[in-house]
Image (cartoon, grey):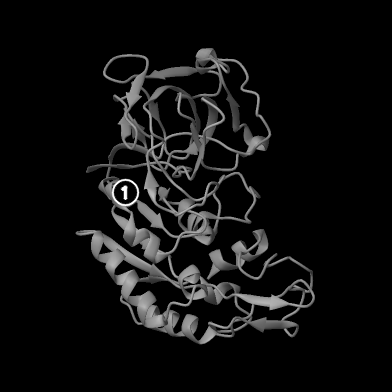
Amino acid sequence: PYLGHVATRTRIPYVWDNTATITLSRTRHTAKDNINNPQFVFPNWYVHGIGGSPDWQEKGPGSSATIQASIEYPVGQFTPIKFGGASSGVAASGDNLVSDQADIRIPRGEIFYIRTHYSNAGGVLVFFQTDTARGEACDVGIAGTPSAAALAGGTITDDGFTSGYGPCAIIAQTTLPSALVVGDSRAYGSGDTFWDASTNQGIIERAIGDQLPVLNASIPGDNALYFIASHSRRLALQLYCTHIIVQHGINDLSNGRTSGQVLADREIIADYFVGKVVLQATLEPVSTSSDSWATVTNQTTSGFEAARNAVNEAIRLSELFLEIADGVESEHNSGLWASSGTASDITYDGVHSGPNGVALGVRS
């Protein structure tokens, strides 16, 4: 037994919005073990991935945040989350706030919601698309609105900005394996939609998250060099996971890095996670198309296709790896996306899988 991550649907903030001061969110999670007396890790830091000359470095928002939260399980029944015995806690800029143990038990497979009120005079952090169809919501405001009253019941009105804030880890005593994923927009799940009740996104989450807890620390636009330059806060989350999945690489190749450099950088990243089981993920293709990827024949491979293949073949020689590319390519190492005959079906931009492409990748 160890104090480990035990649920789905946790992410890392990558947007700092200094035009707002409050977020009130309702996030949806699935218990992947029988959860007893869980704790919740709330971040007051982000990876600068959007807005204001992004550099993909870990940063604090510059001021402390006051956090209040509750567990909604079953739906309509609320258990307060305490911090040092108090109803609210303060997270310094750049730090995590870890809650007390909550007096609740959630059986494996059960859906539960976390309601979080995050207040920061210097701006708010947001990080993922809300699944409004299944009850997620985020209301962003200023000057005391929205209030924390909804932590004990009532409706949270989604503001329509498809953003949300919640815990980056949900932890309890467990014997199950759990995975920390570090990577870019593909691992994050950009382009995927909530097409099933899991609220998982992306090939990696969907491939593993139906059975085991996944802590997705991937950031859209990230690459191996950025991660090497700034990673301490994400690295600290390995405390709650047994396995690490490294997915960086495609953005490095598109920026002119060689296959040898990418493989060396990924090995550096793997070496950060001492004592963990590390799996390297293969890289999906990148191509252009004259018919919106409706067919294979009208696609052209990227200029770094040979380097991508070299990276993938080296990964496949590893003792442990996660195969993603074969599921979405037209054939092994083709550098072209599989095709269904429908435009923008498997991929919509030649870089990211759409929902049907994600489904192919999961099956690989």
Does residue 157 appear left or right of residue 42 in this picture? right
Q: Which residue is mark 1?
A: 176
Residue 286 percent location from the top left of the image: 60, 75
Residue 239 percent location from the top left of the image: 25, 47
Residue 297 percent location from the top left of the image: 74, 85
Work out whether residue 106 or residue 93 is closer to the camera in this orientation and state it: 93
Which residue of the protein is positioned furthest toward the front in this rendering? 53
Query: In terms of image quadrants, where is residue 44?
Result: top left
Which residue of the protein is positioned furthest toward the left in this rendering? 275
Work out whether residue 330 or residue 47 is closer to the camera in this orientation and state it: 47
Query: In terms of image quadrants, where is residue 97?
Result: top left
Query: In terms of image quadrants, where is residue 76?
Result: top right
Rendered residue at 78%/78% (across/down): 290
Mark 1: few, some, or many residues within 10 Å (few <14, many ≥20)?
Answer: some
Does residue 242 appear left or right of residue 70 in this picture? left
Please state which amino acid type lies under the numbered disc 1. Answer: Leu
Q: How many marks?
A: 1
Q: Is residue 134 above or below residue 248?
A: above
Rendered residue at 60%/15% (across/down): 154
Work out whether residue 351 or residue 136 is closer to the camera in this orientation and state it: 351
Could you tell me which quadrant the N terminus lies in? top left
Residue 216 percent location from the top left of the image: 44, 50
Rendered residue at 63%/47% (across/down): 194
- Secondary structure under badge 1? loop
